[in-house]
């Protein structure tokens, strides 16, 4: 497939594709020495951060600042730095810190680039699996270079759905989602990393993913991947200060989107 994106997007795509594994290697080094990590809690005992999160984000920020000094950057650990180019990088240095510090492999590095608020680049690297998911607007999605194309015959009834939950929503809300999914003939997993589960949607491993409250750094790269693989995503607000606030996240293959939207019980 020929590259149809503008040169400015292609340059950033090349940088993001290189940065994902580079940041992932740093994170993997910390993962392999995790018994020595100092871990802090954020909003609750399950919301954790480590020196690995901060060091990996700093590596990514430094490289973006060197290559594209006029771009904005939003990261989970260090917040938003405005830019003047119309491009904003949205990064989660380690999505799935709880699995990370507990020795489970379901974590990843997530890097997205927005152009005027729209995701045009998505890169997710899962170091424990050596899997690099990449997407650029108009150029498709790939896993380790292999094109990803979603199968419209897969639904919530004949495939597996990913679900996410956190303390921003009540247990009753989460229980209702699970109940409606199971009543509809579906099944689900939750692996602790929303970004990685979105990558799995793009790869056809999961038919969809829903989380009632998620931040942009968790989902922007995944949204680009899913859309470029032929899936659908519920719009996420990115204008102004909304980019730094949470919102529902819903992404699915074409055969599951409407059913999952009904299960999620919100209006698209």
Image (spheres, rainbow, N blue to C red):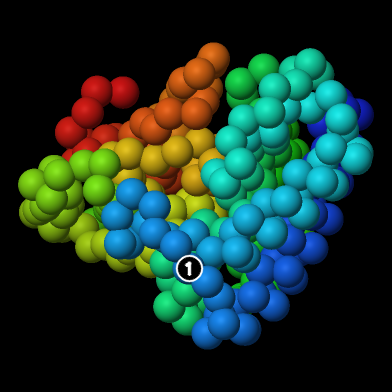
Viewer-nearest residue: 5 or 53: 53
The quarter of the picture where residue 214 lies is top left
Indicate the position of residue 252 as horizontal and vertical percent values.
Answer: 41, 44
Residue 133, image x, y percentages? 66, 57
Residue plotted at (69% across, 33% down): 73
Vertical side of 109 occupied by 78: above or below: above
Q: Quadrant of residue 135?
A: top right
- Residue shown at 21%/42% (left/top)? 169
Say few, some or many: other residues with alpha carbon within 10 Å of mark 1 (under 14 / 14 to 19 / 20 or more).
some
* Nearer to us in this view, 36 or 110: 36
Compared across the picture, whether 180 is left or right of 155 comes to left
Q: Is residue 136 shown left or right of residue 30?
A: right
What's the residue at 50%, 29% (across, down)?
244
Q: Is residue 189 visible?
A: yes
The quarter in which the C terminus is drawn is: top left
The residue indicated by pointer 1 is 39
Left or right side of 105 for 160: left
Residue displayed at 55% across by 75% down: 37
Q: Position of residue 159 (x, y in %)?
A: 33, 61
């Amino acid at each position: 497939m020929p590259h149809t994106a503008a040169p400015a997007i292609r340059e950033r795509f090349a940088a993001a594709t290189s940065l994902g594994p580079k940041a992932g290697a740093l994170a993997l080094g910390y993962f392999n020495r995790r018994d020595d990590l100092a871990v802090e809690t954020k909003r609750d005992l399950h919301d954790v951060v480590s020196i690995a999160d901060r060091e990996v984000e700093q590596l990514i920020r430094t490289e973006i600042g060197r290559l594209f000094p006029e771009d904005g950057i939003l990261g989970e650990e260090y917040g938003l730095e405005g830019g003047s180019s119309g491009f904003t990088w949205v990064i989660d240095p380690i999505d799935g810190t709880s699995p990370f510090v507990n020795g489970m492999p379901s974590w990843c590095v997530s890097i997205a680039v927005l152009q005027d608020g729209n995701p045009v680049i998505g890169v997710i690297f899962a170091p424990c699996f050596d899997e690099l998911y990449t997407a650029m607007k108009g150029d498709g999605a790939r896993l380790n270079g292999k094109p990803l194309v979603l199968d419209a015959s897969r639904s919530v009834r004949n495939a597996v759905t990913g679900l996410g939950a956190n303390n921003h929503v009540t247990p009753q809300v989460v229980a209702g989602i699970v109940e409606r999914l199971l009543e509809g003939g579906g099944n689900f997993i939750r692996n602790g990393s929303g970004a990685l589960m979105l990558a799995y949607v793009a790869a056809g491993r999961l038919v969809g993913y829903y989380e009632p409250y998620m931040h942009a750094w968790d989902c922007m790269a995944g949204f680009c991947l899913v859309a470029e693989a032929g899936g659908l995503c519920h719009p996420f607000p990115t204008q102004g200060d909304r980019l730094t606030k949470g919102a529902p996240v819903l992404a699915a293959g074409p055969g599951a989107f409407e059913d999952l939207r009904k299960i999620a019980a919100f209006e698209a």
